Amino acid sequence: MRQGCNALNYENLMNNFDEYEHIYIEPGLKEVKSKYTKVRRYDKIINYNSGLTAHYEKSRILRENILTKILGDGNPIDIFLVEEVDKEPQLQEVMDNAIINVYSYSTHKKITLFAPSSNRLISLYESVGEVPPEDLIKKSERNVQRGYNKIFNIWKRTF
């Protein structure tokens, strides 16, 4: 069993794989991810002055403000180019506070940021043949335990 993965969720996924296959691809499953997503390291600089995409709505701004207030800005530690079938390629910037900033690959405009589950981080790193830093996984698990990954969902239901 992978370190950092929630054993029950992983086992549930594997037992019901056909049900999930087209709805949600569980991070970390290379044999499935490779059919849908290509991930590689991005070693260039992101143009942070490119602005925000049209998708950056009030809820995303609220989430960014809350996460920044709680966790700080964070410092970038890795950037991945994520290319999903039938979607625009994205740059996913992993921060040292276990937040992922997502940018359009073509314009470098910010799409969103979020507090990912440890599975998401594990998936990114495993996709390039690496193991994520253990402290990053611990921070991510703490963020999820505190509900930081649900800030958007809470806002949507409240307003």
Image (cartoon, rainbow, N blue to C red):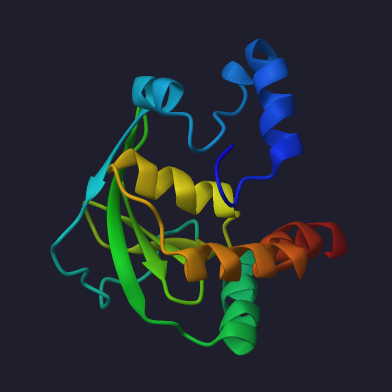
Give residue 5's position: percent from left, percent from top.
62, 45
Quarter of the image where one finds residue 38? top left
- Is the residue 85 above or below the residue 99 in the image? above
Residue at the location (49% across, 56% down)?
Answer: 55
Q: Is residue 101 visible?
A: yes
> Which image quarter is the N terminus in?
top right
Please name whichever residue, 143 or 138, is drawn nearer the observer in this view of the structure.
Answer: 138
Please name whichever residue, 65 or 5, is drawn nearer the observer in this view of the structure.
Answer: 5
Q: Is residue 89 visible?
A: no
Left/right placement of residue 10 relative to residue 125 reads right
- Is the residue 111 above or below the residue 73 in the image? above
Residue at the location (37% across, 19% down)?
Answer: 35
> Which image quarter is the C terminus in?
bottom right
Give residue 72's position: percent from left, percent from top.
53, 87
Which residue, as the protein is rendered here, is positioned at the far right?
158
Residue at the location (76% across, 70% down)?
Answer: 146
